[in-house]
Amino acid sequence: FDTTIPALKITQLTKTYPNGFAALKGIDLTVPQGGFFALLGPNGAGKSTTIGIISSLFKPTSGSVEIFGVDLLKQPAKAKQFLGVVPQEFNFMQFEKVEDILIAQAGYFGIPTKEARPRAEKLLKALGLWEKRDDKARMLSGGMKRRLMIARALMHRPKLLILDEPTAGVDIELRRSMWDFMQQINTEEGTTIILTTHYLEEAEQLCKNIAILDQGEIRINTDMKSLLTSLDVESFVFDLAQPY
Ligand code: ADP
Ligand code: MG
């Protein structure tokens, strides 16, 4: 596999919603393979719009998205094999059982149940959900539902995992354990990870590279070290890091 191909390459991406609102105004973003990348931005910046396009929930107005060199708009099925997405909103079947949700997900990718079971077991144990495997999803706490979506996104061993504010509303202890888990997936499975967040602290802990999105435009795209040593940027960034 050619390691020089970026995991994600977004070129001049725009999205104008049907009501005329321009949520993305031409963004460029390249994330190399193996990276752990943060897309930081305040509410309404366009983070979920970007992820919605990458997940094929809706089409961009213009521009292109390549996932491991595969054009998402031209070869969506092929591009999706590489991709696992954890959306901001819960979107699983509330009345399904936890383990069944994971087995079904693997099925969408043509993975037989026999192979899916040990994968589900590994992920459920790593995410502290193994005891809950026979519970209906709706019985889980918010933090558990979030972790269930992470497990589901990883069932087919995607090469790129994208998480939309995975730790929003999660208490600090659980947040730390989710950070550990994401780091483990990044290093042990070599999965490229992109997360959106508005916690600067989170981006700082985890990510080597960062882009700041604001009002549909990329304002800053740099490595974490230069970001934190640049005074100009700091004042801007701390505005974003307010708790919510
Ligand atoms: P973020 O995830 O960074 O908080 P979003 O991508 O969800 O931001 O939203 C970006 C902007 O687009 C916001 O101003 C939001 O109100 C607007 N928006 C999102 N979805 C729609 C929609 N379906 N129609 C019109 N405007 C939308
Ligand atoms: Mg969002």
Image (cartoon, rainbow, N blue to C red):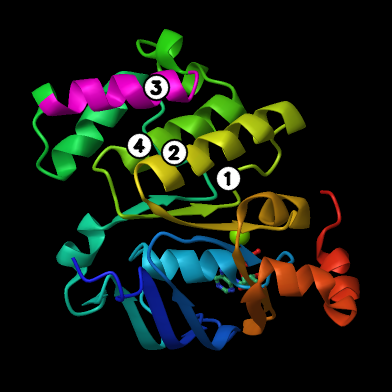
**Marks 4 and 2, how far apart at CA:** 5 Å
Residue 97 vs 56, above or below: the answer is: above
> Which quadrant holds residue 239?
bottom right
- Return the x and y of residue 189 as percentages of the image width and height: 34, 43
In the rendering, at what x and y percent does residue 82 appear? Answer: 26, 58
Q: How far apart are marks 1 and 2 (CA)?
A: 8 Å
| Amino acid type shown at disc 2 | Ile
Q: Is residue 116 a member of the stretch shown in magenta? A: yes
Q: Earlier in the sequence, mark 4 or mark 3?
A: 3
Q: What's the CA distance linking mark 4 and mark 1?
A: 13 Å
| Displayed-image quarter of ligand 2 | bottom right
Tell me which label, 2 or 3, sits earlier in the chain: 3
In the image, residue 18 above or below residue 207: below
* Residue tagged 2: 150
**Which label number is shown at residue 152?**
4
Report whether 38 appears left or right of 97.
right
Amino acid type indicated by mark 3? Leu
Q: Residue at label 3?
A: 124
Residue interval drawn in magenta: 115-128
47 or 82: nearer the eye? Answer: 82
| Circle nearer the viewer, 4 or 3 | 3
Tag 3 secondary structure:
helix
Residue that label 1 marks: 166
Q: Cβ–Cβ below 8 Å for labels 1 and 2? A: yes
